[in-house]
Image (spheres, helix red, strand yellow):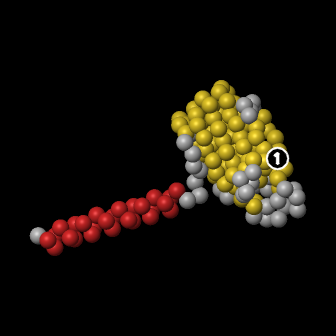
Amino acid sequence: MKRKLMFFCTSVVSILMVSLMLGFTVQAGQSSGSYIWKNANENSGTDFWKASYSYFDGLKKRSLVFSEDCNNECILQIDVTTLSGELDITIIDTSGTELYSYENIDTSQFDVELSDKGDYQIRIDGRKHEGSFSVKSKTTKS
């Protein structure tokens, strides 16, 4: 009886450990934040992030990487479609400095020039927003 209980406990602990490790692995590289969205279609890579949805409320953030030397010409192309609600986009560098902040963006497309290669955090804040956004390196083909 003791042996069965010990085997059961060991099995449960092992399953929990594997589940935790898989959970952390799946989360790596994904966007984070506290948000609600409906009918969402999201696609992302190391240097692009795009999503469309019927409703987005909250905060999502993700790191994008410029891995090639840009020679002071690192450009992010930002596309936003706003059907209703409000959407803000903030770009933050590796030291945590807020480089750019765009608030209540209407349907538009614009470029943001960054100073150098590296990781940049993109923060998307939605308030009952319906529409889409796309943030990508000008060199991205997707």
Determine the residue positioned at 88% across, 62% down: 71
Question: Residue 28, position in %: x, y?
Answer: 55, 59
Q: Among all residues in the image, which is located at the extreme bottom? A: 3
Amino acid type, callout 1: Val
Determine the residue positioned at 67% across, 54% down: 63
**Location of residue 126 with respect to 75 vertically, above or below:** above
Determine the residue positioned at 72% across, 31% down: 104
Quadrant of residue 107 in the image? top right
> Which residue position holds label 1?
112
Q: Is residue 120 left or right of residue 18?
A: right
Element type at marker 1?
A: strand
Question: Residue 115, position in %: x, y?
Answer: 84, 56
Residue 39 visible at all: no
Q: Quadrant of the N terminus?
A: bottom left
Q: How many marks?
A: 1
Determine the residue positioned at 61% across, 44% down: 60
Mark 1 burial class by Cα count in 10 Å: few <14, some 14-19, many 20+: some
Question: Residue 40, position in %: x, y?
Answer: 56, 39
Residue 75 visible at all: yes
Q: Among all residues in the image, which is located at the extreme left? A: 1
Q: Nearer the viewer, residue 49 or 63?
A: 63
Quadrant of residue 94 in the image? bottom right
Q: Is residue 61 left or right of residue 74?
A: left
